Amino acid sequence: MSNFITISEVISQAFNRSIEDGKILDNDITAAEWKYIKPILTDDLWDDAKANPSSYVDLIEKIKPCLSYYIKYEIMPELSMTISDRGSFIQTAGDSQPMTDEQRRVLRDSVLEKANSLAEMLSDYIATAELVEYERIDNLKPQIIGGILVYKKIGE
């Protein structure tokens, strides 16, 4: 299955300066999709959107900004470091000051906050778009079966 977003779209949506395409891997995108987007969509909507992306153009356009910032959040530590066969190094530019650990943490936290805000917007869109495959939590009722709490659709 292909990803919801391309590397160049991530760069254009989440970065204010150009970075090398090679700094973001397809696996970074896949991992962020699974970690952050799949729980928002729920399994049925996720599966259908992955299998039939042309049927979910509007949804995928809403996913992209949110996903871009989650990817940025996830790769930020790697952007400032180099790992090679010669060891691990913190990268610095010749004409700028390196960030302190605290400044790096504040920046990364702000990226996560923006991603979470965009995720809330995505959740609101999904809840109001009346997507058939989306299983809303308010359509579920908790039950205890064999000592385990499970949620079943109302009416099942």
Image: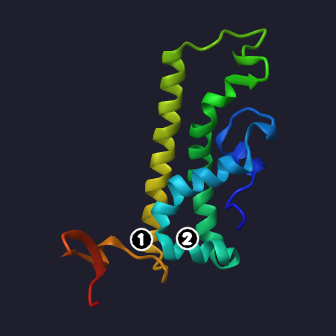
- In this view, the residue in front, 149 or 113, is 149
- Looking at the image, residue 58 lies above or below residue 62: below
Which part of the image, by quadrant, shows the C terminus? Answer: bottom left
Is label 2 in a helix, a strand or a loop? Answer: helix
Where is residue 113 shown, x and y percent of the image?
A: 46, 39
Q: What kind of residue is marked 1?
A: Ala
Q: Are marks 1 and 2 in contact (CB under 8 Å)?
A: no
Residue at 54% in and 22% down:
104
Circle 1: element type = helix
Q: Residue 46 carries which label?
A: 2
Crowding near the residue tagged with mark 2, few <14, some 14–19, many ≥20 C-alpha atoms within 10 Å = some
| Residue furthest to the front | 146
How far across and how far down the image is residue 11, in percent? 72, 43
Q: Give the mark nearer the N terminus: 1 vs 2.
A: 2
Residue located 48% across and 83% down the image: 132
> How many numbered marks, from 0 up?
2
Question: Which image quarter is the N terminus in?
Answer: bottom right
